[in-house]
Image (spheres, grey):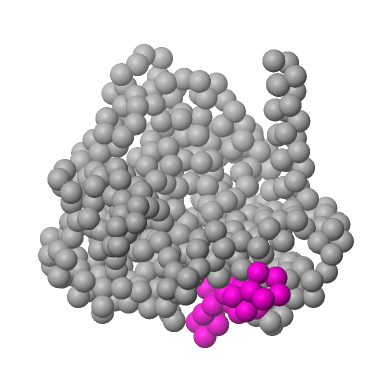
């Protein structure tokens, strides 16, 4: 048993070493600060607190309640709303809260984005229209009947006119915006008016763009008509893995609270609530500067890749308004391969990315294991202190590996040298004491 414990420690150390020498470009990841890590490693990690603060099923929750209320208040300030439930343990669970609250108990109806065009698996039905099982969360857990919104492949966004027709004809109970591939703001304002015409609720999955929204960029779904927003807390919002539900409608608070507990979970990972409180405090202090740089870096990275011969989508729209860029790499199929092949090639040189379906991949016979696209994100490299000039350097590494086909081992050594100057987390309190002082005087 001691040997196994030693093995676990060694593996964890190797993982840390890998990421200290890598370029992390996963759009759904970020890096937490030392203060957040300290809070997450607290004694809260093995405590239990079912229910709402002040209404717990267990005793011993006095200080847990205090932390959770602070976290709620910080979230309400950051997102400028009247209600924040920080109990969901993930973005998927936060989405389920919306499904529970806004759809009927007997196979309700929802409009959302399809997976190949940016939607998340938690938005998906149990079966495709042809009957193939995909076991999407919305269909499998809630039994929802899903009708997809129309998508403009050239603009990489929801088509508002065609989607309005779909909403009026299908008459869903919930219209859900938000996506995993999320380059540009969704037409929430235009289509929320249509949803209200037929009595539907409007939800918004902000998992990827929550930090951008909280810091005043991208879009403001609550002010644009969303009844509630679901989000995860470890992407552009650089906290621990957790979830949150927001709303500005006081008349929905009771329903949203009950749709979370007791409907979905009991204890809700209290240590991550503490870590989230610290992360929210950091973003209130540093978020505007941080997220401005995240978006600038994404644009600079896209431009640098484009200049080196890569087919970055949406050049005519400035490539992106978020932390993400999408690259069509199908032109490398005969020389290097498709998304899965390129993902493995880059990983061999310590560039960590993820392959991604393009909207047209399925009809061209490509599969999610080896699709035609790459989704790249700048949240983590920005928090490590990189700026626009470093985005050019990273694009050059892509060129060396994919176009020039240089030896990955040689490029890996260059990347390790490149990373030496980017080892400290930025846009955060540089000591845990400062973080706690901020919260104390909040």
**Most distant residue in the bottom direction:** 316
300 or 95, nearer to the observer: 95
Q: Is residue 226 visible?
A: no
Q: Residue at x 51, y 29 (%)?
A: 271
Q: Position of residue 259 (x, y in %)?
A: 25, 39
**Left or right of residue 89: residue 236:** right
Q: Position of residue 320 (x, y in %)?
A: 52, 73
Q: Which residues are magenta?
A: 310-337
233 or 399, nearer to the observer: 399
Q: Residue at x 77, y 68 (%)?
A: 401
Q: Is residue 114 visible?
A: yes
Q: Residue at x 53, y 63 (%)?
A: 356
Which of the 4 image quadrants contains residue 50?
Answer: top left
**Left or right of residue 132: residue 32:** right
Q: Establish if 250 lies above or below 159.
A: above
Residue 331 covered by magenta stretch? yes
Residue 416 covered by magenta stretch? no
């Amino acid at each position: 048993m001691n040997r196994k414990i030693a093995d676990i420690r060694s593996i964890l150390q190797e993982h840390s070493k890998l990421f200290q020498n890598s370029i992390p470009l996963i759009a759904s990841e970020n890096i937490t600060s030392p203060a957040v890590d300290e809070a997450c490693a607290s004694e809260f990690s093995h405590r239990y607190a079912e229910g709402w603060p002040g209404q717990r099923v267990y005793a011993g929750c006095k200080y847990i309640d205090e932390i959770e209320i602070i976290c709620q208040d910080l979230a309400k300030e950051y997102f400028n709303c009247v209600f924040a439930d920080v109990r969901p343990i993930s973005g998927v669970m936060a989405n389920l809260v919306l499904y529970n609250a806004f759809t009927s108990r007997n196979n309700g109806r929802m409009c959302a984005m399809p997976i190949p065009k940016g939607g998340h698996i938690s938005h998906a039905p149990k079966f495709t229209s042809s009957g193939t099982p995909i076991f999407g969360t919305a269909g499998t857990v809630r039994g929802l009947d899903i009708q997809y919104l129309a998508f403009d492949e050239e603009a990489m966004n929801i088509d508002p006119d065609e989607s309005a027709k779909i909403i009026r004809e299908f008459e869903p109970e919930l219209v859900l915006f938000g996506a995993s591939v999320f380059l540009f703001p969704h037409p929430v304002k235009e289509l929320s008016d249509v949803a209200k015409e037929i009595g539907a609720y409007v939800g918004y999955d902000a998992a990827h763009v929550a930090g951008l929204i909280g810091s005043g960029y991208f879009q403001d779904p609550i002010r644009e008509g969303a009844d509630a927003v679901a989000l995860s807390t470890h992407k552009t919002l650089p906290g621990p893995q957790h979830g949150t539900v927001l709303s500005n409608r006081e008349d929905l608070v009771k329903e949203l609270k009950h749709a979370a507990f007791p409907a979905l979970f009991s204890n809700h990972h209290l240590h991550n609530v503490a870590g989230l409180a610290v992360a929210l405090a950091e973003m209130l202090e540093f978020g505007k500067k941080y997220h401005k740089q995240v978006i600038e870096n994404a644009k600079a990275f896209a431009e640098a890749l484009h200049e080196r011969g890569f087919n970055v989508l949406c050049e005519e729209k400035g490539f992106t308004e978020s932390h993400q860029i999408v690259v069509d790499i199908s032109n490398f199929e005969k020389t290097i391969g498709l998304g899965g092949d390129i993902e493995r090639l880059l990983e061999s040189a310590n560039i960590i990315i993820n392959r991604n379906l393009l909207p047209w991949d399925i009809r061209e016979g490509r599969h999610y294991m080896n699709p035609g696209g790459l989704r790249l994100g700048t949240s983590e490299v920005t928090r490590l202190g990189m700026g626009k000039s470093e985005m050019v350097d990273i694009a050059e590494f892509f060129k060396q590996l994919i176009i020039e086909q240089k030896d990955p081992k040689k490029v890996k050594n260059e990347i390790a040298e490149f990373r030496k100057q980017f080892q400290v987390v930025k846009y955060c309190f540089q000591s845990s004491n400062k973080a706690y002082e901020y919260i104390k005087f909040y």
